[in-house]
Amino acid sequence: MSPAAVRLRVTVVTGLQDIGVAITRPAATRVADLIATLVAQFGLPGTPAGWELVFAGRPLVPLLTLGEVLPSAADEPIPVTLRPISHPADTLGTPAYPPPARPSAPPPPQVAAPSRRRESADEDSEDAGFGTAEQAPAGKAKRRARTTEARRATVRYYTRMNPARVFPLLVTLTRQEVEEVVKRHVGQKATGPLELDGDTPVEIEPVLPGCDVYPPAVVTRLGADDQVFTFHVVPHVLGEVTGARVLLRQDHAVLAEIGLDVRVRQRTAVVISGLSAVVLPAASAAMKHFGLDFTPKDESSPYLAALNLLFGAAPLALTAVLAAVTGVLWWFTRPKGKDVFWDVTTKPAGGK
């Protein structure tokens, strides 16, 4: 029995940058209706007849329902791809919209073929799970033509952040290693060479618990040049961000997981010190005006001694000291600007 609803993770192939979206639809929804909805929702070019929904490498039959063509028991969202019918990745299988019927013609004469060749074609057809025996070898040749490319994933980020502020996070996909920048509180971590399929989209997802990340993830294809992706992080917690990492996926499989060392610190000390630089000198001057004296008579009260030290100094001297403390605290907790953080240069080939 088909479930009442089907959870899907749809990857829309637009040609420039792929889009990932999670949706839930009734199992009785026709594939053609879902394609029409997605084409209208994302403003895709052409008509729904020019698009197809693919699951496990096979285009789904538009006239059937989701419950008939997709697995009935799935704990996770089912990954499907919406792409143009002319997409070169896989042109085999059941066409998204059946071609018009042709007038019947007499069958061609049967030509005997070597048994070994026929057995190979039958095996290829069974491995593919769809299409004719003559189509399978062509599809297999196309799959062999796919090439892998080596890329290194590098993450550059701020190891110390302040809450409710925006901090950048860079993820690069390069052929060579990225030069590490020398800057306080900036970290950089990288993977070794990764073998990536040039025809399959790559998904990059930063995961920082307790923080907002914009955009949440990026789905892209490998380009001819090195690629740099910018995310923005807004912390909402204090202390260590446990489990901070960046995930790289391809074909819904995790290829690399890069751990990040991030701490969020509050700037309350700067605010308190700045207010003290204004309030305490004013209070000291007022106490001197009204004749309040905290000098201990018998040198036995440490509290009176501390108050006398605090309010007994000249207001200008107290202002200067507190202003200096405020400046030092601000310097060590100041937000970082756009400088060498954004300089992404790679090492020369063969360099160390």
Image (tube, rainbow, N blue to C red):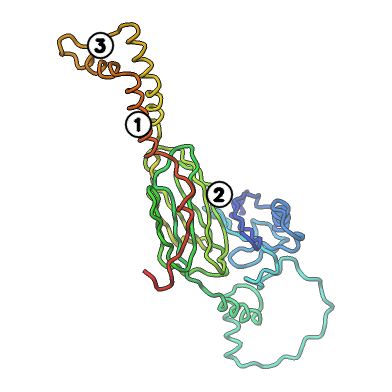
Q: Secondary structure at mark 3?
A: loop
* Gap between marks 3 and 1 measured at Cα: 25 Å
Residue 105, given in percent of the width and then of the height, sits at 82, 83
The residue at 35%/26% (across/down) is 320
Crowd class of label 2 (few under 14; some 14 to 19; many from 20; radius 10 Å): few
Q: Earlier in the sequence, mark 3 or mark 1?
A: 3
Cβ–Cβ below 8 Å for labels 3 and 1?
Answer: no
Using the image as rendered, state which of residue 266 and residue 311 is in the foreground.
311
Q: Which residue is mark 1?
A: 324
* Gap between marks 2 and 1 measured at Cα: 40 Å
Q: Earlier in the sequence, mark 2 or mark 1?
A: 2
The reply, left or right, for residue 258 in relation to residue 299 is right
Amino acid marked by disc 1 = Ala
The residue at 61%/56% (across/down) is 19
The residue at 40%/40% (across/down) is 264
The reply, left or right, for residue 172 in relation to residue 10 is left
Residue 252, given in percent of the width and then of the height, sits at 52, 60
Q: Secondary structure at mark 1?
A: helix
Crowd class of label 1 (few under 14; some 14 to 19; many from 20; radius 10 Å): some
Amino acid marked by disc 3 = Phe
Q: Which residue is mark 3?
A: 294
Amino acid marked by disc 2 = Pro
Quadrant for the N terminus, please.
bottom right
- Is 299 placed above or below 4 here? above
* Gap between marks 2 and 3 measured at Cα: 58 Å
Question: For residue 215, which numbered disc appears in the image?
Answer: 2
Residue found at the far right of this picture: 103
Label 3 vs label 1, nearer the camera: 1
Using the image as rendered, state which of residue 138 and residue 107 is in the foreground.
138
Quadrant for the C terminus, please.
bottom left
Q: Secondary structure at mark 2?
A: loop
